[in-house]
Image: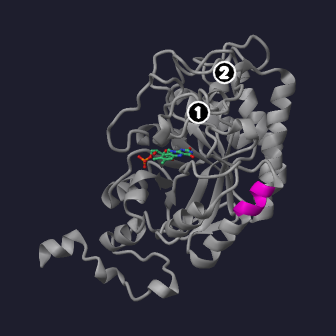
């Protein structure tokens, strides 16, 4: 019996299996509004066999977007455009739909990856904000250190976006607290040099993220899972470690969050993540064990056997895959066939049974 394809209940949400599709920016929105690209992209992934599809980092204010092409939930137009896409995915797909809400902080005002991925120059750049006026890397915009009013405004923007997400009818909300974006840059001592109640000790650096969690929780009904993607490591001697991830996860649990997703890296332009398969798994294992919160893990989880082992060995409760799903949008079907399990399939596709995808093992036996 596959553990990867066993169901899990998250708050009031029943998920058919433990395979999630990680949020992936598409840089294809217009002033934050999703477009036809998203209809096709998300529509395709909604029929992957994964129990949950998490929509890309969706920004809570216009200047909180990474690029001009990033999705937002800061206007009625954004909400209407996203509602159209999500309604479509629900009608045609089998996955439950989640959303990641985010603020890019000092990594905002950037070019789309295929335009270079660096800071915007001529093309309508904007003033970025951060805990401290320290740029993300050489040549990047110098952010303005946030005032206490800015902190309140951004917190309230998270709440407003969460309300919009609830109106759209999402099944799950994930706060983006990783990858060097605003909340992560408050938590990390590398980017936060404040001397007020939001800087200095870990307790102070956690405050921004915890206050957002506390403000968002009441607008997300109890049955709907609310979680956060956090940093397992900054991969630098002067940065966050797995110990910090454990402490932060405990504190987020206390705020009523239902799960954490363990990712890592991205705090400065010159840090690199390890390249090994499942590089965040040992950190997730510690968080799951020591913080006692439902734990999802992401990062170079590629093969069905690898994903199965993570769950079967109790190292995480769920896995999230990003690039492997872009590479093979039926990853869930194929993995289920390999592991002799079932996945939900759209009626139109029922004739493609598991036997169509001869598992490697049975091929070898034949
Ligand atoms: C095209 C692309 C867009 C991404 N956008 C986001 C995003 O919106 N939010 C986020 O937290 N991570 C984002 N990521 C990171 C992935 O969610 C994931 O954490 C990372 O790719 C590692 O997982 P993988 O090895 O399965 O790809 C993105 C990755 C890719 C490849």
Q: Residue at x 67, y 25 (%)?
A: 186
Q: Position of residue 294 (x, y in %)?
A: 58, 51
Give the overall secondary structure of the magenta segment.
Answer: helix
Q: Which residue is mark 2?
A: 202
- With respect to residue 345, does 58 lie above or below? above
Other residues around mark 2 within 10 Å, as few (<14) / some (14–19) / many (≥20): some
The secondary element bearing badge 1 is classed as loop
Q: In terms of depth relative to the viewer, which is nearer, 191 or 87? A: 87
Using the numbered discs, state the Cα–Cα distance from disc 2 to disc 1 in whole angstroms: 29 Å
Q: In terms of depth relative to the viewer, which is nearer, 150 or 334? A: 150
Query: Quadrant of the rendered structure where residue 206 is?
Result: top right
User: Residue 110: which numbered mark, if any?
Assistant: 1
Q: Nearer the viewer, mark 2 or mark 1?
A: 1
Q: In terms of depth relative to the viewer, which is nearer, 332 or 116? A: 116
- With respect to residue 248, does 15 lie above or below? below
Residue 115 belongs to the span the image colors magenta:
no
Q: Which quarter shows the N terminus? A: bottom left
Residue 81 belongs to the span the image colors magenta:
yes
Marks 2 and 1, the one that precedes in the sequence: 1
Q: Is residue 1 visible from the viewing direction of this image? A: no
User: Residue 304: which numbered mark, if any?
Assistant: none
Q: Position of residue 309 (x, y in %)?
A: 35, 55
Q: Which residues are magenta?
A: 77-82
Q: Residue at x 51, y 58 (%)?
A: 21
Residue located farthest toward the front when viewing the structure as drawn: 122
Q: Position of residue 180 (x, y in %)?
A: 57, 30
Q: Position of residue 291 (x, y in %)?
A: 59, 40
The secondary element bearing badge 2 is classed as helix
Q: Residue at x 74, y 35 (%)?
A: 210
- With respect to residue 6, does 322 lie above or below? above
């Amino acid at each position: 019996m596959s553990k990867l394809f066993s169901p899990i209940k998250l708050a009031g949400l029943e998920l058919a299996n433990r395979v999630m599709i990680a949020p992936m920016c598409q840089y294809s929105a217009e002033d934050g509004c999703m477009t036809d690209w998203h209809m096709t992209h998300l529509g395709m992934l909604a029929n992957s066999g994964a129990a949950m599809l998490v929509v890309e980092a969706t920004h809570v204010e216009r200047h909180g977007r990474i690029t001009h092409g990033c999705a937002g939930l800061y206007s009625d137009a954004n909400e209407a455009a996203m509602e159209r896409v999500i309604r479509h995915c629900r009608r045609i797909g089998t996955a439950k739909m989640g959303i990641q809400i985010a603020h890019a902080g000092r990594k905002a005002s950037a070019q789309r990856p295929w335009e270079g991925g660096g800071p915007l120059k001529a093309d309508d750049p904007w003033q970025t904000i951060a805990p401290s006026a320290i740029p993300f890397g050489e040549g990047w915009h110098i952010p303005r250190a946030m005032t206490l009013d800015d902190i309140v405004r951004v917190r309230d923007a998270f709440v407003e976006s969460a309300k919009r997400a609830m109106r759209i009818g999402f099944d799950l909300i994930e706060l983006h607290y990783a990858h060097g974006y605003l909340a992560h840059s408050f938590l990390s001592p590398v980017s936060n040099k404040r001397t007020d109640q939001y800087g200095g000790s870990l307790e102070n650096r956690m405050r921004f993220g915890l206050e957002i969690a506390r403000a968002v929780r009441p607008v997300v009904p109890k049955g709907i899972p609310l979680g956060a993607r956090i940093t397992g490591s900054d991969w630098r001697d002067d940065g966050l470690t797995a110990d910090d991830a454990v402490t932060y996860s405990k504190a987020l649990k206390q705020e009523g969050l239902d799960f954490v997703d363990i990712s890592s890296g991205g705090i400065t332009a010159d840090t690199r993540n390890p390249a090994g398969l499942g590089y965040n798994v040992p950190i997730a294992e510690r968080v799951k064990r020591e913080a006692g919160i439902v734990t999802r893990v992401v990062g170079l989880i590629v093969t069905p056997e690898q994903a199965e082992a993570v769950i079967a060995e109790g190292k995480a409760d769920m896995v999230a895959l990003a690039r492997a799903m872009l590479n093979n949008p039926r990853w869930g079907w194929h993995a289920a066939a390999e592991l002799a399990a079932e996945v939900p399939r759209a009626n139109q596709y029922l004739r493609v049974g598991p036997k169509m995808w001869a598992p490697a093992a049975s091929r070898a036996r034949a």
